[in-house]
Each structure stands twice: as C-alpha cells, then as structure tokens.
Image (spheres, helix red, strand yellow):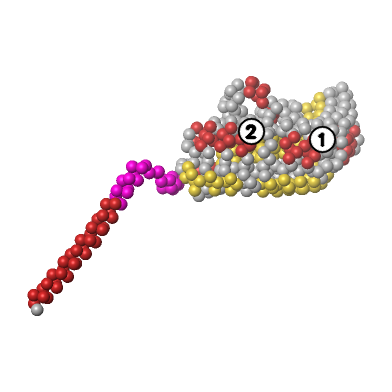
Amino acid sequence: MSSLGILDLSNNGLSGNIPEQLVEGCLSLGVLMLSNNYLKGQLFWKNFNLKYLTDLILRGNQLSGILLNSLSNGSRLEALDVSLNNLFGKIPRWIGYMSSLQYLDFSENNLFGSLPSSFCSSRTMTEVYSSKNKLEGSLIGALDGCLSLNRLDVSHNYFRGNIPESIGSLVELSFLLLGYNNLEGKIPSQLCKLEKLSLIDLSHNHLFGHILSCLQPTSKWQSERETSLNPSGNSLCYENKKPLIGFVVPAVEDPSMNKSVEFTTRSISYSFKGIILKYISGINLSCNNLTREILVELGNLSNIQVLNLSHNSLTGLISPTFSNLKEIESLDLFYNNLNGEIPRQLLDLNFLFAFSVAHNNLSGKTPKMVAQFSTFNKSSYEENSLLCGPPLTKNCIGAIPSSPLPRSPTHKKEENDVIDMEAFIVIFSVAYIMVLLTIDVWNLQICRRLTN
C-alpha cells in the first residue's frame, strides 16, 4: 500500500480505534477520508507522519483527546475536517503556521480557550468553521492576517467584546457567521468595505446602536444564477419550484461543497449545503439591542433572500421600499416597536415564504390575503392591538374611525338655512307667548275696573 494515494472508508459503520497500521505504510497517501463512522480514541499518534497528505477528513465520529502537534508534520495539508467529534482542549498555535492549510473545520467539539494570535500566520486559510464549541475571549487580533478568508463561522461559542474593526481588511470574506456569542458594542462600519459579503449572521449577541445603511450583501454569482438557474431572475427556485429555505444539494467529495451552513429565520435553523451556498444572500441581526428606525436603504437589497431583524427595539414605520426586495423569501420583523400601517406594496413580494410582523405597535388593515400573503396565518400579525382584518379575528368595521368628509358650499348653505328657520321659530314662539300674557293681564285689569 506504499503507493496508495486516496483512501476513503467513509459511511461504512466502522468502530473502535483507528489502527496505527492503517497509515504507517501508506507513505504516498494524499487523501484520507474516514468520516461518518463510529471511530473513537485519540485522533492520531505522536509518530504520525504522512508528509504527502493533503486532505484529512474525519468528521462525524467519536474521536476524543487533544490535537497533537504531530499533525503539523503534514506540511502539505490543505484540508483538515475533524468536526462532529469529542475533541477537547485549546486550538494549538501550530495550526496557524501550516503553510498550505486552506480548509479548517473544528465544528461541534468541546474545544475551549481563545483563538491563538497566530491563527492566520500562514495567510492561506480560506474557510474556517469552529461553531458549537466553548471558545471564548476576544476576536480582536485573532483574525489579523486572514486576508484570504472567504468563510468564517465561529457561531455558538462564548466570544465577547467588540467585533474588531480590522475585519474590514478581510476583503475576500463572503460568509460572516458570529451569531450566538456574547459580542457587544456597535456594528462596525468597516463591514461596509466587504463588497463580497453575502451572508451575515450577528444574531443573539448584545449589539446596540442602529443598523448600518451601507450593508449591501449580494452574491457575486448573481449573473450566473440569472442565466443558468432561473432566466427570469426572480427567485431561487429550481424546476420543482420549491423555495430556497431548506433546500440541500447532494453532497460531493470536496469538503467545502459538503459543508452545511446554518442560518436562522423565524427561530428555525435551516441548513444550506453544496452549490446553493454560492447563491444565498441574507442578513440576520435578530436578538440584539438595536434601536432607531429601519432605514429605507434596506429596500435596496434587491438580491437578498433572508432578512431577520426580529427581537430588537426598532421603531418607526415599515418602509414601502421593502417592496423592492424582489427575491426575499423570509422577512422577520416581529418583536420590535414598529408602528404605522403595513405597506400595501409588500403584496408585490411574490416569493415570500415566511413573514412576521407580530408583537409590534402596528395599526390599520392587514394586507389582502392574495398571492403569497394568503399563506400567512394570524401568528404573522398577532399582538398588534390596532391591527385588524383577516386572518386576525378583529373586524375592521368600526375598528378604524373614518375621517369626516369635507362639506360642499351647498351643504353649508342648506345648513345655514336650517339654522335661520330654527331661530325664527324660537323667536316667533317667544313673542307669541309674550303677546298672550300681555292680553291676559289687560283682560284682568278690565274685569277689575268693571267690578268696581
């Protein structure tokens, strides 16, 4: 087996420890894939030395222990995936010095501590996934040098402090997933420098301030999508016309193409996988302390599919410019302090799959139950005391006071005529009574004189 170049034993139900003899004699091994089995024990051994190894894919097992520095002997290692295991300990410093490493996935283990300052010393990494661990500390300084980074997912950890302003130097970044941490402060304006950014998740943190008007996530593959997937350019729907939400492309061997990315909308996490990741565009800023009005500039995000601003303290009106979100499939604005009416222009959003403005201070009538809006039930509008109309049980008749109609000059003249007639009757009646009383008094005096 000394000339073996690729060994793939994934999805075979293998159990027990990885035998040391498995790789000892495979001196030419370039790709080793043992994912989705039941392998356990230490990741590898101190004398591990596969100097030609480029891809090591071990995700979805029960491997434990720490990351031994013997892996650093693989100077040609380009992809390391040990996600979905039971590894613990800190991320070692030598990871950042692997001169060929491009793809790194530590997701769903028990790693703790902070990202080492040398994390991107080699400046070769393009994708880093370390979600669902116990990592902590500040991100400031940890991402310096990650100039080639295209996707970063460190969500579901315990990172704290501000989002580093230096993130604006990561000009290749397309995915920024920092949700479910303890980050605080304002959203840095440097994010606006990232022209390739298509997916932003800063949800479930302690961010405050206002939403940046310059955030313009877009897919750099927009033109390709319009020509090859959907000539109409209206929605991310394939031949079966199913929406983007929940759609998963079959896995391929490339670890990057086989990686699932979670994005939350309406408190539900959806996994996007495979080539579809090239086409998705979304913003999730939910569950923070963001304030002020929703800027009308957000209506310029014509290519976005997911927008989640729920669970904040946003105020003001829902802008009619939201009708320009022609490809939006999920729009969540619930649990804020929004007021005014729901713009009727939203009926133009023909591909809306999920929608909620519940728990606000909205008033007026709900949008007509036509097209996509016929699929939304009362949970999309509930807890808006001044909102009425179907699917809510509150009827709009009598619920909304109508403005008085302006009166015409003819009406005013008729009204004046009525008033004059009423005055005449009153004056005439009083005068008539006074005359009668005068006559009675005069008659009484005459009677008295005749009697005398």
Magenta residues span 392-419
Task: Tell which of 155 and 363 is nearer to you.
Answer: 363
Which numbered tag is attached to residue 146? Answer: 1
* Residue 225 position within the rendered picture, expressed as x and y whole percent measured from the top left: 65, 24
In the displayed orientation, state which residue is furthest to the bottom. Answer: 452
Asked if residue 92 lies in the magenta stretch, the reply is no
Numbered-mark total: 2
* Residue 268 position within the rendered picture, expressed as x and y whole percent measured from the top left: 62, 41
* Distance between the alpha carbons at the discs numbered 1 and 2: 27 Å
Q: Is residue 315 visible?
A: yes
Disc 2 packing (10 Å; few <14; some 14–19; many ≥20): many
Which residue is found at the position 29% from the left and 48% from the top? 417
Quadrant position of residue 195: top right
Counting residues from the start of the chain, the first of labels 1 and 2 encountered is: 1
| Direction from residue 374 to residue 223 in the image, left or right | right
Asked if residue 411 lies in the magenta stretch, the reply is yes
Which residue is found at the position 57% from the left and 27% from the top? 241
Q: Amino acid at mark 1?
A: Cys
The residue tagged 2 is: 301
In the rendered view, tell whether residue 419 sits above or below residue 20.
Answer: below
Q: Amino acid at mark 2?
A: Leu
* Residue 87 position within the rendered picture, expressed as x and y whole percent measured from the top left: 80, 42
| Direction from residue 246 to residue 166 in the image, left or right | right
Which residue is found at the position 12% from the left and 72% from the top? 446
Which residue is found at the position 32% from the left and 49% from the top? 416
* Residue 139 position within the rendered picture, expressed as x and y whole percent measured from the top left: 79, 43
Q: Main secondary structure of the magenta part?
A: loop
Task: Tell which of 179 and 270 is nearer to you.
Answer: 179
Looking at the rendered structure, the secondary structure element under dot 2 is loop
Task: Tell which of 98 and 329 is nearer to you.
Answer: 329
Quadrant position of residue 85: top right
Quadrant position of residue 228: top right
